[in-house]
Amino acid sequence: MDQATAQIGKPGGREMIAPVAFVLGLAFCLTPWASPATALGLGVVLALAGLTAWPGPGKKVSRFLIQVCVVLLGFRMDFAQLMGTAKDGLLFAAGTIIGTMALGYIVGKFLRTGREISLLISSGTAVCGGSAIAAVGSAIAADGTAMAVATGTVFILNAIALYLFPVIGHALHLSPEQFGTWAGVAIHDVSSVVGAAKSYHVAGETGATALDVANVVKLSRVLWIIPLVFYARWMVKERPETAPVEAAPAPARRGLSIPIPWFIALFLIASLLRSVIPEIRPWADTIKTIAGYGFQLALFLIGAGLSMKAIRAVGWRAMAQGITLWIVISISGLLVVMATVD
């Protein structure tokens, strides 16, 4: 047993080593050798080894970093092009979101997942992962167990997608526009969408549009959080459930809370500024680099926030529903993208 291993095994050893390992991990994410996938993987390894430091602040910082970096990416995109991309994908977004929610309701009934867990997993898959789960869960006063199960399910599938999607994209020779659209539709969280698109661009042979397209497509879906919250609230009020399978009874329902994704407005303002201020354009590559490192730090913090308790909370019913929805939206989305996007 070497000295480091012996130190970890001592009482308080992890508490002493964790901050050092955590800071070294953060530093590595700022090096040229890091990638979104390695950043997330390193964070998960530290979490499972019990070497995570400052998990509470880390969660808040990761969310803030993602929003700031999304806004920065707005400075790389022409406003007219941005509006055109969002408009072209409007019907596609509406169809996949409504279809995912409908399929989630059916699969949840079949698996007896439990109304709250089923609704949360469906919302996270349809719109934007953890953000949608948090918004819908808050609006319906979801039980903490249901939130943990849904979030854990989405986290696991996000991690898989971050590694798997670029491999599939290259195997099918998807263009950057095709891959960006597919990733924006089929991957849950903004951070993993950007991470996969960034990895695809780094590993690919063609231009820099995969990241930009993925970002626009995903943000256009984030806006659907607002009507989704109304739908979830209606489901809870009009169709009460008496015996959820995997969740404890929910607390008393609070008033409706509508989350406003203000960072999307800032993203649009940044894009508009790029269009009217030509001096911003030469900084596009620098902005992309800074945003890329920011996303890698966020993915590291997300991975480091994983806990064995959250993993154990994911039952087979919830995971089966999450995987089913994810496979359906991934395959159907890919087929539509390959048929309609050049």
Image: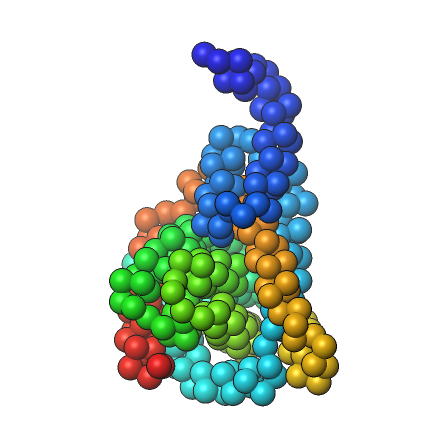
Residue at image location 36% in from the left, 73% down from the top: 175
Considering every residue shown, the one lying at the far front of the view is 282
How many numbered marks appear?
Answer: 0
Q: Position of residue 317 (x, y in %)?
A: 33, 53
Does the image show residue 93? yes
Residue 32, x across and y down, in percent: 54, 48
Quadrant for residue 83, please give it. Answer: bottom right
Which image quadrant for residue 162?
bottom left
- Quarter of the picture containing the C terminus is bottom left
Q: Nearer the viewer, residue 57 or 278?
A: 278
Question: What colouring method underlies this structural image?
Answer: rainbow
Instruction: Tell whether 262 sits left or right of 91.
Output: right
Q: Residue 186: x and y, percent?
A: 39, 67
Residue 283's spot in the image, x, y percent? 66, 69
**Residue at image point 52% right, 72% down:** 212
The N terminus lies in which quarter of the figure? top left
Residue displayed at 59% across by 77% down: 77
Residue 89 falls left or right of residue 227: left
Is residue 99 visible to us here? Answer: no
Image side of residue 200 versus residue 27, left or right: left
Nearer to us in this view, 161 or 208: 208
Query: Vertical placement of 302 versus 323: above or below?
Result: above
Instruction: State the residue in front, 205 or 101.
Output: 205
The residue that appears at 61% across and 25% down in the rendered structure is 17
